[in-house]
Image (cartoon, rainbow, N blue to C red):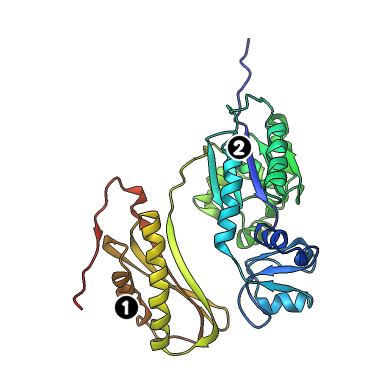
Amino acid sequence: MSEVPTYRKIIHIDMDAFYASVEQMDNPALRGKPVAVGGSENRGVVSAASYEARKFGVRSAISGVLAKKYCPEIIFVRPRFDRYKEISNKIHKIFYDYTDLVEPLSLDEAYLDVTQNKKGNPSATLLAQEIRMRILNEVGLSASAGISINKFVAKIASDYNKPNGQKTVNPDEVLAFLEDLPIRKFYGVGKVTTEKMYQLGIFTGVDLKSKSLEFLEKHFGKSGAFYYKVVRGIHNSEVKPHRITKSVAAEHTFDVNLSSEIFMLEQLDRIAASLEKRLKKHNVSGKTVTLKIKYSDFSQQTRSKTLPYFVSDKNLILETVQELLYQEKMKDSVRLLGISLSNLNTEEKKAVVVQLKFAF
């Protein structure tokens, strides 16, 4: 007698237009209207867009100027990240009523492993419905969910019936679901990879499945093995309750473009101070300092340096950033500057944090 295979029961919860929905919830005058969080009609980048704005093609990461062009009635709202984090914490408390295996991906989405859950409910579908209803009743926002045997399929499924819906892909449906899936909807396949796959005759999951491991590794390197496995329903990544932070960053978009390195250093001093606060709050330090520069033509450049020791001190970070700033001449005026610290000590059991003391 053959054993019945056991599968994980994974739920991916994704809040619907989270930042914009919080703004509409807090300000009834914005409800039913096209809202963009971040940006402005003159400059800046949109962080999130309400569903009313998305109908016009407004989405995250486009410029405020373009958003205004697409939707002349767009209402720009300044982001309030402290408020979003407050709401996110309420939502996560609901998750922990069901399982301790919660892996947050961001403020507005998370994986839950409910294979063994605190409610003793064998149906992940019913649990997802209950979680979504509680978020709606207790927080006032709608969420969508994907339910399946692994994180990869659950993530894709959560996007199917948005907003305020869910989709379950049962174990016996996984392969057919992936075979029918357009390749652009595969999680982890971005625009560049999609175009490359199109050129290779790969348009759907079934096309991807027809390619050998050798073929995929030849054209996509290490990612080839990932694509080979996931299209066959193989994705063994566990839900990790304590995700390791890989980088900490701070950046700022300016109202007026900067053309002088002296002015840039003044701003970088403020950005470094903000970064230091975040590092201390999370009790982390890092070795790799990266300077991010976005020019007035929206082209972007990063410059990095890895130090032989861990740092979290603002002055030491700024010293490295200054070196990176003068590494080469600016090719244009600058609209955004950012500093990030990676190669963190979160992967080390013990780390020596170098703090410099300056004489005044």
What residue type is disc 2 on?
Asn
Residue sitting at 62 percent across and 32 percent down? 9
Residue sitting at 54 percent across and 54 percent down? 220
**Dots 1, 2 in contact, CB < 8 A:** no
Q: For this rendering, which residue is in front, 238 or 193?
A: 238
- In-image side of 300 versus 190 (left or right): left
What percent of the width, then of the height, locates residue 347? 35, 48
- In-image side of 154 versus 103 (left or right): right
The earlier-in-sequence mark between 1 and 2 is 2
- Relative to 123, residue 348 above or below: below
Q: Which residue is mark 1?
A: 323
Q: For this rendering, which residue is in front, 23 or 127?
A: 23
| Quarter in which the N terminus is drawn | top right
Indicate which disc residue 23 carries.
Answer: none
What percent of the width, then of the height, locates residue 124? 67, 32
Q: For this rendering, which residue is in front, 300 or 265?
A: 265
Q: Which residue is mark 2?
A: 150
Report the label total: 2
Residue sitting at 35 percent across and 83 percent down? 326
Q: Quadrant of residue 92?
A: top right
What residue type is disc 1 on?
Glu
Can residue 231 be seen here? The reply is no
| Quarter in which the C terminus is drawn | bottom left
What percent of the width, then of the height, locates residue 119? 62, 27
- Relative to 346, residue 48 above or below: below
Q: Quadrant of residue 318?
A: bottom left
| Mark 2 neighbour density, 10 Å: few (under 14) some (14–19) many (20 or more) | many
What percent of the width, then of the height, locates residue 279? 38, 60
Q: How far is the residue under mark 1 from the one under mark 2? A: 45 Å
Judging from the image, what secondary structure is the residue with disc 1 in? helix
Q: Quadrant of residue 45?
A: bottom right
